[in-house]
Amino acid sequence: MAPKKLAKSKYKRILLKLSGEALQNKTRNLSIDPEIVMTIARRVKSVYDMGVEIAMVIGGGNIFRGLTGEGRGIDRTIGDYMGMLATIINGMAMQNALERCGVATRVQTAIEMNRVAEPFILRRALRHFEKKRVLIFAGGTGNPYFSTDTAAALRATEIGADVLVKATKVDGVYSADPMKDPKAKLFKKLRYSEALSKSLKVMDAAAFSLCMENRIPIIVLNFFEAGTLEQAIAGKDVGTLVSD
């Protein structure tokens, strides 16, 4: 039997943004489910095998979210730093899974933690790409009041990513919440200006502005539907593409 031919990638370098909730299993009451993390790692490896340079940003909401803590009496600044530490934990879990899949991976963090991760240094990050390593950017931007969406947009800009892929549980960007409105329309392609004028929530305002100003296309897709990530990277019509 002939080996399966890998699809050709449209993009050389991507940044994949995942929510922290993607790693958890609410049924089993696990903040980080190793089986789910391994499933995600295999999906990432399938894109890596297409010859794509991959960076990842993973949120920390499965462990702690600063805004939630503020509502429970934790200072917002302290809560945001706690959330940043949560992203480092998630990054280490993903690194472990990827390396078990045979993919060399490095975690770089905006908060120095030399025993478990490298500090974020752009030149070092670019060198890792040359050595065919997957990069996981953790610790957010290193500053409170900025989301991991913003961290993803910032890192995508710094590394010169060809596209930012926002992995979600829905098929793309809709005109309304498809869970609440059965008449909600799925947009296949949007201009940045259209997304703004229609008040569509693609990413938070700071993240969206960074992508728009630096002309980084955003693909919003259902990561958990088999094959969607690979198809999107191959340039197929999957999810919603937001660009200029």
Image (tube, rainbow, N blue to C red):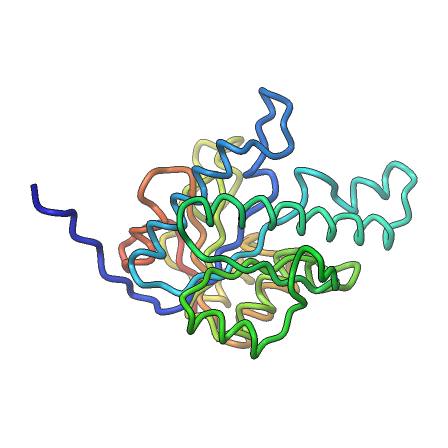
Residue closer to the observer: 211 or 96:
96
The percent position of residue 167, horizontal first and vertical second, equals: 48, 48
Image quarter of the C terminus? bottom left
Image vertical order of residue 90 relative to residue 157, above or below: above
Residue at horizontal 61%, vertical 69%?
A: 154
Which quadrant would residue 143 be assigned to in this image?
bottom right
Q: Residue furthest bottom?
A: 123
Residue closer to the observer: 80 or 136:
136
Residue closer to the observer: 68 or 129:
129
The percent position of residue 95, horizontal first and vertical second, equals: 54, 50
Q: How many marks?
A: 0
Q: Residue furthest left?
A: 1
Residue at horizontal 74%, vertical 62%?
A: 111
Image vertical order of residue 225 relative to residue 17, above or below: above
The percent position of residue 64, horizontal first and vertical second, equals: 74, 41
Question: Would you say residue 244 is visible in this rendering?
Answer: no
The percent position of residue 161, horizontal first and vertical second, equals: 46, 70
Question: Would you say residue 207 is visible in this rendering?
Answer: yes
Which quadrant would residue 118 be assigned to in this image?
bottom right
Residue at horizontal 70%, vertical 64%?
A: 110
Q: Residue furthest top?
A: 27
Is residue 70 toward the left or the right of residue 210 in the image?
A: right
Image quarter of the N terminus? top left
Is residue 146 toward the left or the right of residue 49 in the image?
A: right
